[in-house]
């Protein structure tokens, strides 16, 4: 989407926000869950190629039938925790 500005048109930036964690940060956090057998399928999901955390989260939700609801909630909570920790770290720099 573009909008007019005094000196021409300005479009939406396609740059990723510095507050968005790299997918690798979140994958590292999720890797800690792999020792629990209820998260066995998570390893398969994690092998995908994700542009950003939203892509990872979407893939997990698409595969939600592979996880017990408790396990799915724990995975999503871990993603949220990793993102929050990353953002807190960036905010203090």
Image (cartoon, rainbow, N blue to C red):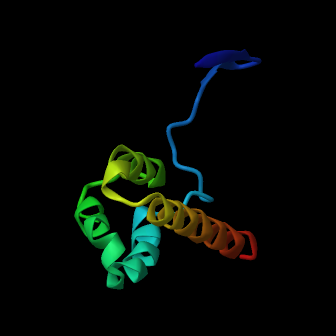
Q: Is residue 28 visible?
A: yes
Question: In this rendering, would 66 be left or right of 93?
Answer: left
| As drawn, 91 above or below 35 | above
Quadrant in which residue 39 is drawn: bottom left
Query: How many numbered markers are drawn?
Result: 0
| As drawn, 35 above or below 86 | below
Seen from the viewer's position, the closer of residues 22 and 65 is 65
Question: In this rendering, would 19 be left or right of 36?
Answer: right
Question: Measuring 46% from the left and 60% from the top, which residue is drawn there?
Answer: 72
Residue situated furthest top in the rendering: 4
* Quadrant into which the N terminus falls: top right
| As drawn, 6 above or below 42 | above
Residue 20, image x and y in percent?
57, 57
Residue 45, image x and y in percent?
28, 59
Question: Measuring 36% from the left and 82% from the top, which residue is drawn there?
Answer: 36
Seen from the viewer's position, the closer of residues 1 and 37 is 37
Residue 7, image x and y in percent?
71, 19
Quadrant in which residue 32 is drawn: bottom left
* Quadrant into which the C terminus falls: bottom right
Question: In this rendering, would 6 be left or right of 68?
Answer: right
Question: Measuring 41% from the left and 60% from the top, which residue is drawn there?
Answer: 68
Q: Is residue 51 visible?
A: no
Quadrant in which residue 92 is drawn: bottom right
């Amino acid at each position: 989407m573009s909008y007019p500005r005094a000196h021409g048109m300005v479009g939406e930036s396609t740059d990723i926000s510095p507050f968005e964690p790299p997918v690798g940060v979140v994958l590292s956090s999720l890797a800690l869950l792999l020792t629990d057998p209820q998260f066995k399928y998570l390893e398969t999901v994690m092998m995908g190629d994700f542009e950003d955390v939203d892509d990872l989260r979407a893939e997990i939700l698409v595969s939600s039938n592979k996880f017990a609801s408790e396990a799915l909630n724990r995975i999503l909570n871990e993603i949220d925790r990793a993102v929050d920790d990353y953002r807190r770290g960036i905010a203090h720099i």
